[in-house]
Image (cartoon, grey):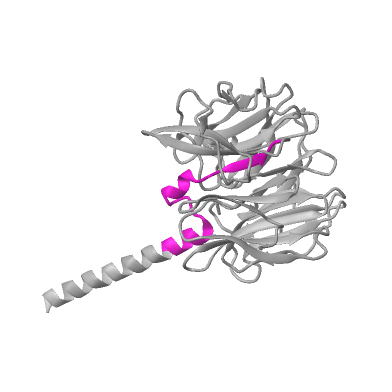
């Protein structure tokens, strides 16, 4: 009898372990967990230059050494140039989950790359910057953007260049939380900081604080509004532990508008959801924002809403099913493009919601699918319209025009 009982308990334990692992795998596939070893390397960004070439920045590991590599394509991703390292010496690179290298261009074709170099896992690191002034043939030595050199979290960078050519780089920063806790106090989450370069990336000024109490592990949405002013949107920790979102306008001299709450899901969770927002503006000043809500019940999953110039926010609209995650939004004139991931239990699809009339009417369609692991869907602005750039484990980098009808 004892032998039978021991065997039964062993079989039951194995069954429970199998079921638990299956549940974790399903959740990770649905929500793009950074817990998958392979997914940590898939973080990719892309952008079109003024000549219509598509540039891509990815992480590459060679014999244990990590680099950012650049490639470009002149035929919408059908073929790519050989990868070029932007660093002469290796350094640890964050390129998974909510972290990825970022690409931007200056008015004269300058190529800018920002990224997080992870000094110690999970998020102790520095925000780094590299530039090329000769069309990607050579790159400058990497520099650290922030003045603070403490061994703390500087991570989840985002970058945008305004019409004057000034480079704005935001990041999640842990200095205030560390100081508060060292003094015996409490501090929810981290903070959002930024730095500015007015000389094409030769030097940066900062560190300017945007807000205290940001989520610790969520990407920051960063864009220019209709007036050309940089606007940051981030997941904020509202008291006592509500993980909704806020926005603020940034300036080159460090003056920041008062943060304004822009989502009201009331998702109370004492943990970081690893789901940052995306935001874009139409020429008439309408704000288009997408985000993720993990609160159970109505409104769970990926959401979309608009806000008028006076700040009035429309009713959120659910994107896809409750399995929808990691949405991205891009606005070009009257054309609005939204993409998100959605897992159906067997494979992951990228779905798109597109409008050609500023959001008055919409079409929804599937534009890509993969059976393996994948990065977050990423939208790049081409002169003909939005383009999905999606790096997958099985299929490589997929480049798909979002508004093009299938033939």
Q: From the viewer's perspective, is 52 left or right of 98?
A: right
Seen in the picture, residue 186 relative to 62 is either above or below; the reply is below
| Depth check, front residue: 309 or 163 | 163
Q: Residue at x 46, y 41 (%)?
A: 122
| x and y percentages locating residue 26 in the rendered image | 45, 64
Q: Residue at x 51, y 26 (%)?
A: 87
Report whether residue 147 is seen.
Answer: yes
State which quadrant residue 129 falls in: top right
The region drawn magenta spans 24-49
Image quarter of the N terminus: bottom left
Q: Residue at x 80, y 62 (%)?
A: 314
| Depth check, front residue: 232 or 94 | 94
Report whether residue 187 is seen.
Answer: no
| x and y percentages locating residue 338 in the rendered image | 69, 57
| x and y percentages locating residue 312 in the rendered image | 84, 57
Query: Which residue of the protein is positioned furthest toward the bottom in this rendering?
Result: 1
Q: From the viewer's perspective, is 314 left or right of 123?
A: right
| Depth check, front residue: 329 or 243 | 329
Q: Would you say residue 225 sits in the magenta stretch?
A: no
| Depth check, front residue: 231 or 407 | 407
Seen in the picture, residue 272 relative to 128 is either above or below; the reply is below
């Amino acid at each position: 009898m004892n032998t039978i009982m021991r065997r039964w308990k062993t079989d039951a334990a194995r069954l429970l372990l199998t079921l638990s692992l299956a549940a974790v795998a399903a959740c990770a596939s649905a929500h793009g967990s950074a817990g998958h070893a392979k997914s940590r390397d898939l973080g990719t960004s892309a952008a079109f230059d003024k000549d219509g070439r598509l540039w891509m920045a990815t992480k590459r590991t060679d014999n244990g050494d990590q680099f950012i590599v650049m490639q470009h394509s002149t035929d919408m991703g059908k073929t790519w140039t050989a990868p070029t390292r932007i660093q002469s010496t290796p350094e640890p690179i964050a390129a998974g989950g909510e972290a990825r290298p970022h690409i931007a261009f200056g008015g004269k074709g300058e190529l800018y790359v920002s990224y997080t170099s992870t000094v110690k896992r999970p998020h102790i690191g520095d925000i780094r910057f590299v530039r090329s002034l000769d069309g990607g043939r050579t790159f400058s030595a990497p520099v650290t953007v922030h003045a603070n050199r403490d061994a703390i979290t500087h991570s989840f960078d985002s970058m945008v260049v305004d019409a004057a050519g000034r480079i704005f780089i935001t990041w999640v920063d842990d200095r205030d939380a560390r100081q508060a806790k060292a003094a015996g106090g409490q501090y929810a989450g981290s903070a959002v900081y930024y730095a500015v370069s007015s000389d094409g990336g030769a030097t940066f000024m900062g560190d300017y604080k945007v807000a205290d109490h940001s989520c610790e592990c969520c990407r920051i949405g960063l864009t220019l509004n209709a007036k050309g002013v940089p606007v940051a949107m981030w997941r904020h920790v509202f008291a006592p532990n509500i993980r909704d979102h806020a926005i603020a306008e940034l300036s080159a001299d460090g003056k920041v508008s008062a943060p304004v709450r822009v989502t009201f899901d009331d998702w109370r969770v004492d943990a970081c959801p690893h789901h940052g927002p995306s935001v874009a503006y139409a020429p008439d000043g309408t704000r288009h924002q997408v985000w993720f809500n993990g609160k159970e019940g109505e409104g769970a999953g990926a959401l979309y809403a608009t806000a008028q110039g006076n700040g009035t926010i429309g009713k959120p609209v659910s994107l896809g099913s409750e399995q929808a995650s990691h949405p991205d939004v891009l606005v070009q004139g009257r054309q609005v493009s939204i993409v998100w991931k959605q897992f159906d239990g067997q494979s992951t699809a990228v779905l798109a919601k597109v409008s050609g009339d500023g959001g008055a009417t919409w079409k929804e369609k599937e534009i890509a699918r993969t059976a393996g692991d994948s990065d977050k869907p990423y939208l790049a602005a081409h002169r003909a319209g939005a383009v999905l750039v999606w790096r997958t484990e099985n299929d490589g980098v997929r480049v798909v025009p979002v508004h093009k009808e299938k033939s």
